[in-house]
Every structure is written in C-alpha cells, then in structure tokens.
Image (spheres, rainbow, N blue to C red):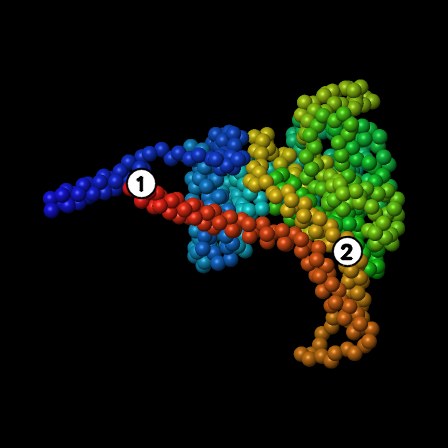
Amino acid sequence: MGSALRAGMTLLVISLLFLAFNLVWVPKLPNVRWDVSYTQIHTLSPSTRQLLTTLEHPLDLYYFNAINAPQRSQAMSRYGRRVEDMLKEVEKAANGMINLHVINPTPFSEDAYKAGLFGLDDTQGFLGLIGTRAGHSAQRIDLFSPEHEPLLEYEISHLLHKLTHPERPTIGLLSGLALDEPAGELLEQMREQFNVVELAPTIAQVPSSITALMVVQPRALPERALYAIEQALMRGAKLMVFIDPVSEIAAQAISTNARLDALLTAWGIQMPADTLLVDNLYASSATPGPGMPKVLHPARLELPRQAMNPTDPSTWKVDAVTVSSSGALSLSNNNRTLLTPLLQSSRQSALVDAERFASATTFDSLIDETATTGERHVIAARVEGPAYSVFPDGFKDLPPGMQRAEQIQVVVVADTDVLADAVNTAQPNGNTQFVLNTLDNLAAPEILRRIQPRVITQPLHRLEHMREEAAQAYRKSAVELERRHEHTEQAWQRLNPEHASLVTQAVDTNTQLQALNKERLQLPIELHALKAQAYAPLQRFERYLKGLMIATMPLLLCLIAWGLVLYQRRRRSAVPAAYD
C-alpha cells in the first residue's frame, strides 16, 4: 500500500513539474529555427534585411488568408502557410517597425467586406496583403499565387518599398515610331504608373533625373540620339529597348542603322535585321486583310507561361505575351556580358528571310515548309555586364563622353508590335503587364533589384522533355485539322448566321449546311483523339511515377515489419538452443 502511494505521489509531482515547466519556462526560451532547405527559401536575403533596416516609419500589414474557403485547393492552403511564415520573418527582422495582422475572413463577415473593399481577389478565397502607412495611400497584393512562389520575397519587399517611397519613378520615352495611336492603351497605363517624360528624337543628352529609359525602334533614330542613349547607359541609367526587323506599327520601311549594330555588339548581343522568327507550336490566328478569313500566322506568336522566365520580375502575374514578326537575340562573338532569356520560342521554331512574308497568302504554306532545328530562340532578354563606347571621339559637335562602363543593365525585346493595342487584344493586359513590370524593376533602387528569386524545386527534366515532345507531336499532326476546322467554322457561320428567333425553330435541311455542321462537330473529336494519342506516353509515365511514389512508403513499412518478424522468430528459436 505504501509503495503504491509513493509511486502515485511521485507521478503527481513529476506531472506538476512538467506542467510548470511548460507554462513558465518554455515561453521564455528563445525561438530557434533552422532552415534546412537547399536554397534557404525560409531565410530572408541580406538585401531584404537591409531594406528593412531603412524603414523610418511604422507600417501595418494586414494579411488576409481565408483558411476555410470552400473553393480553396490544398496547394493554396499550403502556400498560405508559406506566405504567413515569410511575413512573420519580415515582421521579426523589422525590429518593431512592422505590425503584422493575420486575418481569417469568414464569408459575409466584416473582414471579408474590408478585403473586398481593398480589391483583394476572392476567386479561391482571400489570400492577399494590404499595407498601410499613416498619411499615405495603402498598397496591396491582391492575390498570392503559388505559380509566383520564387518571387514571394520580391513581392513583399516591393510592397514595403512602395509604402516607404510612394512617389512615382521617372521614365524617359524615346521612340522612332509614332505610338500615340497604335499603342494608346499602353501609354495610358504607363502614365498612371510612372512620370513619363517624352524625349525628342534629336536629343543630345538624356536628363540625369531619368533612371530608366524606354527606347522604341532605335533603327529609326538619328545617330545623335544613339549617342545620348549610350552615354546615359554608361552613367548608370537602365534601358529597355524594342528592336524589330519588321514593325507592323510603321508601314514604311526603316533603314538599317549600322551604328546601332555596333552598339548592340558593344553590349554583347546581336539581332539580324533581315530575319523573322516563326514558330509552328506557338503560332496564333490572324487576319491577313479586311474581309479575308483567319489563318494560322506562324510569325504571330502567343507565348504561354512555359515560354517565359518564371523567376524574373518581368513576368510577374503574366500568363501570356503576344509578339508579331519578331526577331531573335543571341550573344555576339567575344561577348563579356550575361544574357538571361525572358521570352523564348518553342523548339518547333526557325528563322526565315523577312521577304517570305511579303504576301499574307503564304502564311499557311510556311507552316508546312519551314524546317525547324529543335532550338529555342530568345525573343526578350536581360543583358548585364561591362560595355564600351562605340563613339570614342564623341559625335560631331558633342565632346567625347564615358568610354567604358563596368556594369550595364539592359532589357532587349526583339519586337515592337508587342506594344500595339491590336496585338495585345489577344491576351488582355499580358503585354502591358510585361512592359510595366520590366520598367518598374529597372526604375527600382539597387537594394530592391538585388533580391534574387528563390528556386523552390527543380523540375523533373525527363517529364519536361516528354511534355514538350508530346506538344510538338500533337502540333505536327493537328495543324491541318485545326486549319480545316477554322475554315469550316467560318463557312458555317457565313451560311448560318445568328439571329433572333422564337423558343422553337425549324431545323435547316440544306445539304451543304448539314455537311458543314457534321464536319465542324467531327473535327474536334478527331483533334481530341490526336491529343490523347500524342500525350498517352506522358500520361502512362506520370501514372507509373505516381504509383511508384505512393507505393514506396507502404512497401518500406512492410519490409521493416517483415524484418522485425524474422528477427523475433530467430530470437525465439535461439532461446531453447541456449538452454540445451
């Protein structure tokens, strides 16, 4: 009896000590965390920490995360926790200058009303951020998307920078083309985001107040303007330049400026002025002329997310970019600069002579005639590194300027039609968002530009290769069927236009109309069958991979259990032998 009482008292004392330790001492222990990820994705970069030390005014961050939203996927839920962890790290590193408020808005609540009032996206449940500073306008990230996870730290830092520096950056615009009419919507968006200063083509010097310069079709600019552009770049200005072998914005021919080619070479890049990029995989539909039916235009490319650099701020929140009659960029000989592709073609692309596009009726034939090399071509790229001057003696009455720069930052786009409203209508705001993102990043301070994207996971290269092969195989076999389907649909619409009718309507028994209707319904079935056939090997491999990943853990546990059973049997069989 006494021993049982002593054991009970001992357990009671131990329980009380354990409870006291958890209630009193555990909260006082330091919060120690270890980031064991390969790329340290849970650790703030030195640039972000430096940005946080420059905060002079307290900021409030309101993080809205609708955890129990019915439309929320598991991936979004996991990413919501990832964003919250990052925000808590930011709050901790800010040393009291940031107050983080984590809010879980329930449907029809006051928090949900406030989130909608500030413009947060509720398509998958609220997952956004609102930043406020006393006496200034609020800033927001309307939706954190898992697709942009490598840019998460940049997104948050960008919002903090906008709160502390609400003034609009100054962007210089120097164009060899008239943009007011063809690119009116883009210019309007630019004037809302930046202080846009339009520079004359005869300018001799770019004002020092301009930190980022946008140049359109420099082949149409005089050499005096090229000298001003070069010297501004040498002094540290950032540059975004659009160069096009055939610009659809300007119908007239543009002469080739040999000094521009030398300038590109000094930057370490080159772009042939007489070749166009065609792509059978990314080709989109276009109308050659008024009253003409649509055809597949192999030079009018609709670039999906797979054609973009997913870890660059230029492609932030961009799902598609459309280019037309673009060129291709490449490194020049003896280059010393770093070229980072932003937009690329597929492997089913090729460079062709620009004269082959003299007649719009050749578009369909070019799809079949063009021989692809399996190489991806660069349409837009960042260029960073040293550069030298191609005007060592100055220019005419202008004295010599800087001869060399240790580090230039240029974004080159081998297309000017990407700016046109007519091209941008295929994917609303895609082209505009790409241009605004790039200009905003170039005009940002160095401390923000140094925040590098974090590569979360490395893709399975075999899967990526198989996906691309399947897409090419489908495209190769489906081009003719898609062309027939588009022509059949147009013929059907001409013979059977939509019109107002009663609730019931007689079926048209016209033989030609019925044949067209049969074909327009049959062709999508054939296209679906071709797609299923092309993607069948990929789907079989994915199912095999999923099954292998799912079965690995149960098999491992079964092996461990089997090993334990064998061990116990051997141990039991060894016991009688020991007594013998």
Q: Give, as a three-letter code, the residue at label 1.
A: Ala
- Under circle 1, the secondary element is helix
Residue 289 position in % (x across, y down):
84, 55
Q: Quadrant of residue 484?
A: bottom right
Look at 67% across and 48% down and name the residue there: 466
Query: Taking 301 as reference, is 41 above or below it?
Result: above
Give how far across and how far down residue 12 sits, in percent. 19, 43
Image x and y of residue 14, in percent: 22, 40
- Disc 1: which residue: 578
Mark carried by residue 477: 2
Residue 290 locus on image (x, y percent)? 83, 57
> What is the crowding at mark 1: few (fewer than 14 residues within 10 Å), some, or many (at least 20)?
few
246 on left or right of 60: right
| Residue visible at 23% across and 42% down in the picture | 15
Residue at 11% x, 44% y: name it: 2
Is residue 224 visible from the viewing direction of this image? no
Q: How much space separates mark 1 and mark 2, taking CA atoms?
A: 75 Å
Q: Which mark is residue 173?
A: none
Q: Residue furthest front?
A: 580
Q: Earlier in the sequence, mark 1 or mark 2?
A: 2
